[in-house]
Image: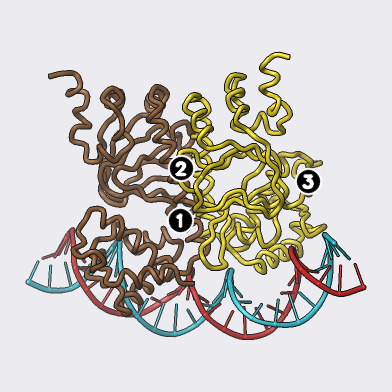
Chain colours: A yellow, B brown, C red, D cyan
Amino acid sequence: MTPPLTCTAICADCAVRDRALCGSLDDRELRALNALGQRRRVAAGQAVAWAGDEAILCGNILSGTLKLVAGPADGREQIVGLLYPADFFGQPFGGQTDFTIVALSDAELCVFPRAGFERVLDDHPRMERLLLERTAASLREARRQMLVLARQSAAEKVAGFLLDMAARAGDGGCCAVPGGPLTFDLPLTRGQIADVLGMTIETVSRQLTRLKNAGTIALPGPRAVTIRDAAALAARAEAA
Amino acid sequence: MTPPLTCTAICADCAVRDRALCGSLDDRELRALNALGQRRRVAAGQAVAWAGDEAILCGNILSGTLKLVAGPADGREQIVGLLYPADFFGQPFGGQTDFTIVALSDAELCVFPRAGFERVLDDHPRMERLLLERTAASLREARRQMLVLARQSAAEKVAGFLLDMAARAGDGGCCAVPGGPLTFDLPLTRGQIADVLGMTIETVSRQLTRLKNAGTIALPGPRAVTIRDAAALAARAEAA
DNA sequence: CGATTTGTTGAGCAATGTCAACCCGAGTGG
DNA sequence: CCACTCGGGTTGACATTGCTCAACAAATCG
C-alpha cells in the first residue's frame, strides 16, 4: 500500500487519535512520530516513571487512569495530578522526572524516547505550540487545585470532586435525562480520593455517607456513584 | 546612532535583561519585542489583571513582588503564585485571565499586548521554547506546593517558607558566613504569608514566635528575619 | 472457604481556626 | 506636640474540624 498507510499503522487504530496531542498533526508529522512511538501496557499499581530518575520517556495515555504523585520520605503522599486517555505525560526539555507516575488501573500508553520526541518538537512548531497550551492548562488546573486543597472544607472537597468525576464520566455520555440521575464508576479507591483531596480515607468515607444519607447521592457499589441531586451537590461544593 | 541601539533602548537599562525570557534572545528578536514593549509602574495593592477578564496583556516583572491570587466568592483567598523580577506573567494563547494579579509592593513591569506577543512567539521558536520551559517549571512548582498545602503541618509550612525566602534573598547575596546567620526582609505581611501557605494570620504568627523562642530565628523587625540555625529550620521543614 | 484488601463507623484527641483583646508604629489632623 | 486612628502584629481562650486509633463489615481473590 502507500507509505502513509504503513506509517500510520500504529495511529490508525489509536483510541485517542483525535483528542491527543497528535490529533492535530498532518500526515507528515504523524509519520515522524510513528517512527518513534511504541505501545506499552502497564498493570494497575505499576510505576511508569520514578521521581528523581532521569526523564527518558514521554507519551500519551491511550486507556486507563494514572496518578502523578508527590511523595516525601514518610508515608504521606499527595496525588498532584491524574492522567486520563488522551493526556500527555513526561517532560520534554526537563532533566529529572519530578513526580512518580503510577497506573491506577491497567493502562495502555503510547511512549516515545524523550530525545527523539524533542527532535520532533524542534521540527514541528505546531506540535510544540499544542504542548505549550496543554502545559499552561495543567498549570491552571494545578493552581485551582491549590485553592481546593488549602481552603475548602472536607464537605466542599468531596462534593466538588464528585462533580468533576461526573463531568468526566458524562463526557463518555450516559446521562439519561440532563439534570437527572447520573451513575458512573469512580476510577479511584477511597484512599486514592483521599490522596487527591488531601484528607484521610475515613473523612472521605464519612462525607460520602453524609451525602448518601442526605439523598444527594447514592452508592450502589463500592466504586459506583449516582448523582441524584446535582444542584444540591453543587451547593455543597461552594458552601463555606 | 545605529538602529540596534535605538531599538534596544528600552532593554538596554533593563534590570532583568539577562534573567528574563528576553535574556536569551539575539538582537533581531529583541528588536521585535522592543517595538511592542512598554514600561509600566504599579503601586502596591494595585491589580494588574483580573480573573475572568479577557487576557490582553502579558510581560515581565522588572522590580517588585506580585501575587497570583485565586479568590472564590467569600473572603477566603489563596495566593497560588508569587511573581518576582525576571518572571513572566500572562497567558499567551489563553482566553480569559485565570487568576487576579496584584502588586504586593510598588512594582515595575514590561508589558506587551498579548496579540502582538503571540506573533513574536510565532516567529521566534527559541522564545516559545523558553516559554514552554518556564511554564513547565511553574507547573512543577505549583505541584510541589500542592503537597505543602495538603500535607504539611503549620510548623513545616512556615519553616519551609522561611528557607525558600532565605534562598531567594541569598541570591541577592548578603550572607556573611555560609551557614552563618542570614538576615533579610520578607516581601510579605503575615496575612500574605498565611494566604500563601493556606493558614491563618494567627497561626503564622504563633509559629514564628515558636521559632524565635527556640532560638532558630530572630525577628529584628516586623518584616525582617534572621536565620540563626538553618539546620534546625531545615529539620523542622521536614519533620512530621 | 480463608485471606486480603477495601470500606464504614465510632470515640477521643490534637492541631488549627475563630473570636477577642491588646500592642505598636506610622500617619494625620487638631 | 499630642491625641487619634488605622493597619499590622501578637497573644490568649475557646470551638471545631478532621486526624488517629480501633473495631468491624463487605467485597474480592486465590
Q: Which of the pair B150/B106 is nearer the observer? A: B150
Query: Is residue B30 rendered to the left or right of residue A169?
Result: left
Q: Quadrant of the N terminus of chain B?
A: top left
Between discs 3 and 2, the one toward the N terminus: 2
Mark-to-mark CA distance, 1 and 3: 33 Å
Query: Label 3 is placed on what type of residue?
Result: Gly
Specify whether disc 1 shares its chain with disc 3. no
* Residue under label 3: A180
From this view, report whether residue A113 is shown above or below residue A185.
Answer: above
Q: Residue farthest to the top?
A: A2
Q: Chain of mark 3?
A: A
Q: What SS does tag 1 mark?
A: loop
Q: Are marks 2 and 1 on the same chain?
A: no
Residue at mark 1: B77
Residues packed near mark 3 inside 10 Å, few (<14), some (14 to 19) or many (20 plus): few
Q: Nearer the viewer, mark 3 or mark 2?
A: 2
Q: Secondary structure at mark 3?
A: loop
Which quadrant would residue A14 be assigned to in this image?
Answer: top right
**Which residue is rendered at x = 45% and y = 37% of the image?**
B53
Query: Residue B198 or D16: which is nearer the viewer?
Result: B198
Seen from the viewer's position, the closer of residues B146 and B171 is B171
Give the CA distance from mark 2 to mark 1.
32 Å
In the rendered structure, which amino acid carries the disc numbered 1? Glu
Q: Amino acid at mark 2?
A: Gly
Residue B63: x and y, percent? 25, 45
Q: Residues within 10 Å of mark 2 (few under 14, many from 20)?
A: some
Disc number placed over residue A94 in the picture, else none: 2
